[in-house]
Image: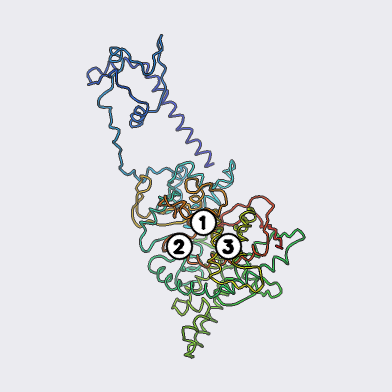
Amino acid sequence: MIHCLMRSTFVTRYLSLQVYETCFYRSTTKLADTLAANEERKCVPLNTNDIISEKYAATVAQSHAIPAMSATVTSSKAMPLLETVNPEIAIEDFEISASKIVPLGHVDKTPLPFEEIPGPMILKLWEKYWRYVPLLGTQLFCSLLISRFTQGRLSWNRNVTPIKYLFDEYGCIVRINGPFVNDIVMIHRPEHIAEVFKQESELPVRSGIDILQHYRLNHRKYRSAGPFSLQGLEWLEVKEKVDRPLHETISNYIGKLNSVCGELVNKIRNIRNRQDEVPTNFHQDLTAWGMECFYVMMFNKHLGFLDSSKSTSETTKVIDALITAHMYMSRCETGFQVWRFFETPFAKKLFAACDILDEIIGKYIRQAQNKLQASSLSKQEKSPNAEKNFSLLEKMMIQGIHSDDIAILLMDMIILGVQAVINCEAFLLYFLARNPRIQKRLYDEIISVLPKTDKTTVIKESLENMPYLKACIKESLRLRPAFPYLTRLLSSAISLHGYTIPKGTFVIMANQITSQREENFEDPGKYQPERWLKQNEYASNPYQEYSCLPFGHGIRSCLGKDMAEMQMMLLTAKLVREFTIEYDYADIRSRFLMVNVPNKSLRFRFLDRN
């Protein structure tokens, strides 16, 4: 319906323009009568040596909003364009009003009002009705467009998301009326994104996840909605306390994370069929790998997610709860939020899954508290060297972070962070499988740094010497970022594309569309890691750094960026060194479930290398 209404609006405007042009054309037949009626006005005769260029004529016509037209000259004799004509004829038949001449250098640079930003008319009509229904989710209104509002109606091209459709229809800046108290502006050009980030304050505000905030504040009665949803000084305080222990833990746990990657290699060898192809549920094995890495990093505990012989009720409960929470969080967040008034079936299932995760996280927090209380009696445990053996959970507790905030942070890392890592790794393996030449070059680099021997030990310096591996990851994140858009609430008015955007406007930056535009990257649809090895290729573009922002930008960028990249580098290096990865089925694209996820099964073939 939206598409039909948009098309009808366009047709109406087009027909109106055609009527206007027809009337304007017919009026030229009465040109002599019009000139006679204006004899009293001062007129400037057209000199025979003056030639008005087509460019100048177009400029004058545009400045007076007169549509271009072609008139038929009725004459018994053809007249050459540049031939000198009789001055008397020129003076008699053509006169130009002096008041109509506008200097070519004059350009009105007054900012256009916010109300003139183009956008879908149907949403403006619906705006007055949205106030009577529950507010739509702040993460993000685009997800409504993708998941509920227009999907299936854009049947003429299902590969074009509604967000891209809006840009193609209305230009590089689009205004959406409602459903918030403030309007929404959507942008994708890097210079516009740069302007938003440059003007943001020291405490920028971004969107949260409403259903998780509701769960924590109303269902669990926590003291806050959690670090992911915190704003201002509260967010800054948590960030400063988490950053240092997080970076220390990443460096200290490379060996253990590499061991987990080795377990996935063994798992792949056990689950392959005779064609060396993994089952259609291989995504669940990646989920088990992601959760095992999380347990090792956060709790310094090896639970056995990838070893079916060691699997426990906890591993099964965590995986099932994670998959359920991720599914129903997306369904609750991307529709009308009726759950604000009563618990809907989707909300109940989400809350039940979150309760399971919260219970397990609470168990490890109590264990860490008991350990720290016991170790406080020993002076030796207080030495700096002893602190290196603490898990990330214990280090955060030493920093003085409240236990409720830690519990909420860990749940966010499981539901959002783990899901983001495993899906980004899935897309990376797909691109490598689709590009054998790139995979071969990556294999040569890995072998040069980590020879294929069982005694090879991976250290941080080893990964630093793999620039092509980093380029492969960055290129995959360019094409399939975990989060396809970024958000900010403007703290002050800014000017974008000649429009004044007022303070308090909610801005959506479509970074996935930005990174796939021809004007930002050559052959943007192709997987070309080499583009990131050319240091000076984009040096002339001052906004190039804003063309690819898979982890966000500024102070509100992803806290787990380094952890995610480390896990992806370790697993990719391990898999490419052991296997040749192939994929023989239809293209894998992304669908949005709060993060980008593959829309098809990961039916990879893992062939042992000689």
In screen coordinates, is 589 left or right of 494?
right
Instruction: Characterize the local packing of mark 3: few (<14), some (14-19) or many (20 or more) Cα atoms within 10 angstroms.
Output: many
Residue 470 image label? none
Q: Quickly name the residue at label 1.
A: 533
Horizontal and vertical percent position of residue 303: 63, 75
Question: In the structure shown, which secondary structural element does the residue marked by tag 3 occupy?
Answer: helix
Split into 4 quadrants, where in the image is the N terminus? top right
Callout 3, which amino acid?
Answer: His
- Seen from this angle, which residue lies furthest front? 448
Name the front one of labels 1 and 2: 1
The residue lying toward the viewer, choosing from 51 and 487, is 51
In screen coordinates, is 605 left or right of 111?
right
Can residue 507 be spotted in the picture? yes
The vertical placement of 102 against 161, above or below, is above
Horizontal and vertical percent position of residue 571: 61, 66
Residue 557 image label? 2
Horizontal and vertical percent position of residue 226: 47, 68
Q: Quickly name the residue at label 3.
A: 326
In screen coordinates, is 296 left or right of 83?
right
Classify residue 329 by image quadrant: bottom right
